[in-house]
Amino acid sequence: MIRVGLIGESPNDTKSFQNLFARRYPGVFDFFSLVKNRTGGQLDDIKEDSKTLRDIRYNYQFEKPDFVVLIRDSDALESETDKFNDRLQRLFALGNAVTHNAVYLLCVWEMETLLLADLDTVNNMFGTSLVYPGAAEPPDPMLKVDPKQFLVDNCGYKVNDCPELFKKIDFNKLLNVRFFNEFVPKFEQRIK
């Protein structure tokens, strides 16, 4: 099995990723959290001597993953270039801590953006009939500001629902979301 260390903004994000990819590639990966008790803002502390980077380096050397997946939310649209690029640079700084043995998943706005690509699954879980609120055809979930709040307001979604939804979500529909579509080949390159 390929050992993959996961670093994400929250346990829900890393568990969601694990649920999605373990289902896509059964028996191929042993996913584990490389850093525990660190959430979004704590991962922004990228000073060379920060406790976060020290913990990542230590756990990376101790656990010896085959590679690491770094998952962060941009909390911005791509058009918000300053904020978006800052988050991207912070993500790459975390990659330094694992000697760049990483694949980067920067979710445009947040992980819930991917849920908007498969509203059928969301609707089935919550008994709703949501439609994507954008005007583009086909809809582009990357243009939706705060998709988590959209789901909370319209179907009673809670952040703890994310891992369960990612057990059921249609992987192929997620490929219609550009940031995910660009991530998948980089991830798959690591298993060839």
Image (cartoon, grey):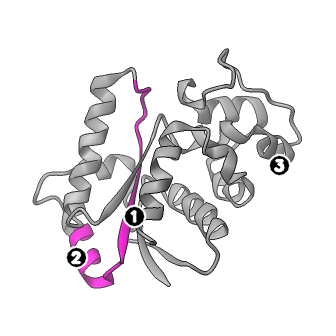
Residue that carries the numbered disc 2 in the rendered image: 58
Q: Position of residue 135 (x, y in %)?
A: 67, 14
- Mark 3 is on which residue type? Met
The answer to which image quadrant residue 17 occupies is bottom right
Residue that carries the numbered disc 3 in the rendered image: 125
Task: Please rate how many residues cluster around mark 1, counting C-alpha atoms within 10 Å: few if below 14, some from 14 to 19, many from 20.
Answer: few
Give left or right: position of 110 versus 166. left
Measuring 69% from the left and 44% from the top, which residue is drawn there? 173
Which of 126/29 is in front?
29
Which of 25/49 is in front?
25
Q: Earlier in the sequence, mark 2 or mark 3?
A: 2
- Image quadrant where one finds the C terminus: bottom left
Task: Tell whether position 77 is magenta.
Answer: yes
* Magenta segment boundaries in residue numbering: 55-78
Circle 1 sits in a helix, a strand or a loop, which is it?
loop
Q: Position of residue 80 (x, y in %)?
A: 36, 21
Disc 3 from disc 1: Cα separation? 29 Å
Q: Nearer the viewer, mark 2 or mark 1?
A: 2
Give left or right: position of 181 versus 127. left
Instruction: Answer whether labels 3 and 1 touch (C-beta < 8 Å).
Output: no
- Mark 1 is on which residue type? Asn
Give left or right: position of 85 versus 178. left
Which of 105/157 is in front?
105
Q: Position of residue 79 (x, y in %)?
A: 39, 20
- The answer to whether 136 is drawn above or below residue 98 in the figure is above
Measuring 77% from the left and 43% from the top, which residue is drawn there? 122
On residue 37, the disc is 1
Circle 3 sits in a helix, a strand or a loop, which is it?
helix
The answer to whether one can see residue 50 in this image is: yes
The answer to which image quadrant residue 126 occupies is top right
